[in-house]
Amino acid sequence: MTSLKRRIAILMMLLLLPACHKMVGREPGFAFPDAPQNVQQILSVIKSKNDSARSFKGIGKISVWDENGSRTSRAAWAGAIDGRLRIEFLALPGQPVAKFVYDGEHYYFISQADPEQHQRACSDPLLTQVAGVPIRVSEVVNFLAGGIPIYDHDSVALEPLASPGGYALVFKKRWLGVVQKIYLDPSRSAVLKVEIYKWWKKVYQVTFEAVRPVNDRSVPFDLAISNGKNQGFRIVTDRYFADAVMTPSMFSWEPGN
C-alpha cells in the first residue's frame, strides 16, 4: 500500500464509520410564540436561510484532526437537501481512491485500500467517529447548503456578549437546560458559530469562515466542526455548484456510479 493510500485509509476509518444512535432531538423551533420581537426577527432570518437552502456539489479539501495531528485529502462531494450525501476522496490527477455514500436509508463505504464494501442500514447517521463529534449527516448537508439546524427547545433568548462582542441566541429545553447557542456578529446579521449541548455539556460546535454569496444565499466556504477541544474535521470548498440537480444514481453504491 502506498503512503498516500495508507493516509487515505486512516482518514476514511476516522471519518466514515457513522453511528446510528440518537443524541438529542432536533426539530424546527421557529414557531415559538413567546419569543421577544427581536428574537423572532432573527429566527425569521434563520428560517429564511433554511428555506432557501438547496442541493449542491463541491470540490475542495477535507481535514480531520485529533491530539495526534491532522490528515487532509482532496475531495469532491454532493449533498441533497433531504440529507443524502456522497463524498469521493481523490488522488492525483483527481481519480477517486475512496467513496462514501448515504442514500437516505443506508450508508456505504469502499476504498482502493480495502476492496471490501462496508454498508449499514441507518437513519440519518451520526459521524461520531470523526474524533467523537456527534453530528448527523443531514446537519452537515444543511450547514454546507447555508442553513442552520435548530434543535427542539422550550425558550429562546438573545444575550449580549461582553467578549468578543456580538450576541448569542440561547435555546433551552426543560430539564435539559441549554441545548443550542447561535453566535451572531454585533450587527446580528451574520452567524459566526453554532454550539450544541446535552445536559449542560457542549457536544460539538460549528464555526463559519469565508462566507460568500452564492445565488442570493450565504454559503460557508470554510466550515470547521469540532467537539470544542482537540478533535474535529474541516471542509474547505474551492468550487461550489449551487442548485445542483440530484439524480438517484449519484447516491447509488453500484459500480460505475
Image (cartoon, helix red, strand yellow):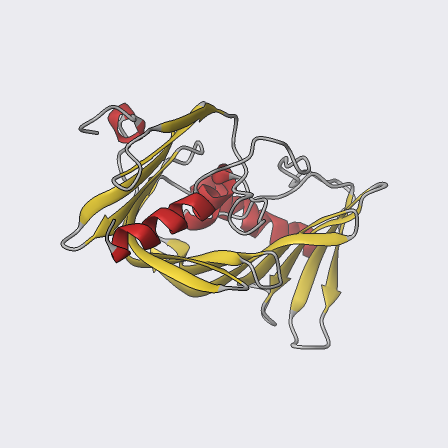
Number of numbered markers: 0
Q: Which residue occupies the foreground of this view, 193 or 70?
A: 70
| Quarter location, residue 192 | bottom right
Judged left or right of residue 101, residue 190 is: right
Instruction: Pinpoint residue 14: horizontal percent, then vertical percent.
Output: 46, 47
* Residue at the image point whose x is 17% and y is 55% from the top: 92
Instruction: Pinpoint residue 228: horizontal percent, then vertical percent.
Output: 62, 61
Q: Which residue occupies the foreground of this view, 33 or 145?
A: 145
Seen as rendered, the residue at the extreme front is 1
Judged left or right of residue 87, residue 126 is: right
Instruction: Pinpoint residue 21: horizontal percent, then vertical percent.
Output: 62, 31
Q: Is residue 105 visible?
A: yes
| Quarter location, residue 100 | top left
Q: Is residue 144 above or below residue 66?
A: above
Q: Is residue 60 visible?
A: no
Q: Which residue occupies the foreground of this view, 12 or 2?
A: 2
| Quarter in which the C terminus is drawn | top left
* Residue at the image point whose x is 29% and y is 26% from the top: 253
Judged left or right of residue 152, residue 96 is: left
Judged left or right of residue 17, residue 33 is: right
Q: Is residue 112 above or below residue 250?
A: below
Instruction: Pinpoint residue 194: horizontal percent, then vertical percent.
Output: 60, 56
Seen as rendered, the residue at the extreme left is 93
* Residue at the image point whose x is 13% and y is 54% from the top: 93
